[in-house]
Amino acid sequence: MGKRSKIILGLLIAVLIGIIATEIVRPKPINWRPSFTSSSKIPFGCYVLYQELPTLFPDSKIETVEESIYNVLTTRDSSKISTYIAINNMLSFDTQESKQLLNYVAKGNQVFIAANNLYGMLADTLNIEMERYYDFKEDTASVSLTNTRFKTAQFRFERGADPVYFTSVDTLNTEILGHISFTEKSFLPTEMDTLKSKPNFIKTAFGNGHFYINTLPAGFSNYYLLNRSSNYSAQSLSYLTNDYLYWDDYKKSGRKIITSPMRFVLNQPALKWAYYLTIFALLLFVIFKAKREQRIIPIVSPLENSSVEFARTVGTLYHQNKDYTNLNHQKINYFLSFIRNRYFVNTAILDDAFIRTLANKSGNSINDTKTLVTLILNLKNKPIHTEQDTVTLSKKINAFKKSYGR
């Protein structure tokens, strides 16, 4: 390697090291994606709320749910009155889950839901409808609770607070617990912006229990629990009084889902460790066996004489196709070539002079030579040959060539 090449290589390595160092020391951008999981510490995670649950409910036992609602509610101890808490930006319950939730609440339990949407069988049964106000840019929303015992009149949310509110509720069984206020923009110069206040937190009775539905899940996230709006989540959850709480950590946007084809293996502790140990053993094998060893000396087989095999193959081909005419012409041409190369006799004209010359040089009798030549001439003039013609020609030629080894 020349001096110039070494300089260029050194510069490339220096640039690469500089890029790596810059990426390491550069602060990571804030992840604003919704997560709402109990272990997520990003702004819209629920790590802070989950850690504060023992403080908010000091006399309650808290169970974290990491499987579907259907499995939890069908296997729970039905003798215990409990509360199910589900917080996420989007919540979707299928028919079976909705039936279990309705049956669960009807028996005197409570369900607290904080989500931007709620539809399907559950919403239809509770006679509620929700609507979202869309704007081109994110704006501030104010939220208030109707209970006069709460000291804070309003809570302001600047980010992630989508104005979602109820447009229809069952007035006979529903109590409004909170409102959301937002500015409805007017894009006409002749009209003014309108400040609207809509219900966003309700308590709906169903059977012997209640549903608590809040349309502002961001209010329960880390971002707002660490600022002056932290009391909103505590006051909203203060309506829950049962001694047993289910914290749903399954229906979450930030739940880690293994999409690898190895997900079954990785979900089973024994199989997962077996898999990791196998990978580790293979790495050790590569490290300690990846050294130079003498190559295996290959066995070089001598070249085979394939002429006989080729002739047999060609003969089999002709025999299978039953093209005796072409086969006999080839045999005749090959035989005449043999005469020219062996006895140096011109085969252009097969007359009596040719027969006498060939008989003298080959050591065959004139009668035998004449019989063979006559057969060759007859076959040349014959348009279609039979299998018997091929057998007769082969016997005559083989008998003639016996003198070749004398």
Image (cartoon, grey):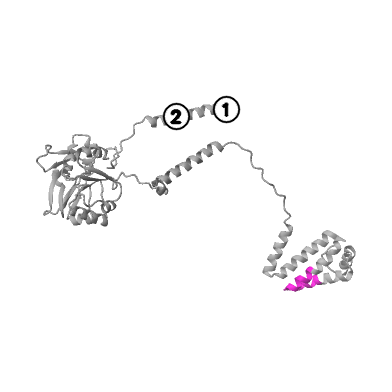
Residue at the (73%, 67%) spot, across then down: 327
Q: CA distance from mark 1 to mark 2?
A: 23 Å
Q: Quadrant of the C terminus?
A: bottom right
In the rendered view, tell whether residue 240 sits above or below residue 171: above
Residue at the (21%, 55%) spot, across then down: 103
- Which quadrant of the view contains residue 292? top right
Please indicate whether residue 204 sits to the left or right of residue 383 in the image: left
In front here: 125 or 59?
Answer: 59
User: What residue span does the magenta drawing correspond to?
Assistant: 375-394
Q: Main secondary structure of the magenta part?
A: helix
Mark 2 residue type: Ile
Q: Position of residue 41 (x, y in %)?
A: 29, 37
Q: Earlier in the sequence, mark 1 or mark 2?
A: 1
Q: Which mark is residue 17?
A: 2
Q: Quadrant of the N terminus?
A: top right
Mark 1 residue type: Gly
Category of crowding for the residue at label 2, using alpha-carbon neighbours closer than 10 angstroms: few (below 14), some (14–19), many (at least 20): few
In the rendered view, tell whether residue 17 sits above or below residue 260: above
Please indicate whether residue 183 sits to the left or right of residue 283 in the image: left
Q: Residue 229 colored magenta? A: no
Q: Residue 393 colored magenta? A: yes
Q: Position of residue 373 (x, y in %)?
A: 83, 69
In the rendered view, tell whether residue 276 sits above or below residue 15: below
Q: Secondary structure at mark 1?
A: loop
Asked whether the viewer can see residue 204, the reply is: yes
Q: Position of residue 172 (x, y in %)?
A: 11, 54
Category of crowding for the residue at label 1, using alpha-carbon neighbours closer than 10 angstroms: few (below 14), some (14–19), many (at least 20): few
Please indicate whether residue 386 sits to the left or right of residue 161 in the image: right
- Residue designated by label 1: 2
In front here: 405 or 277?
Answer: 277
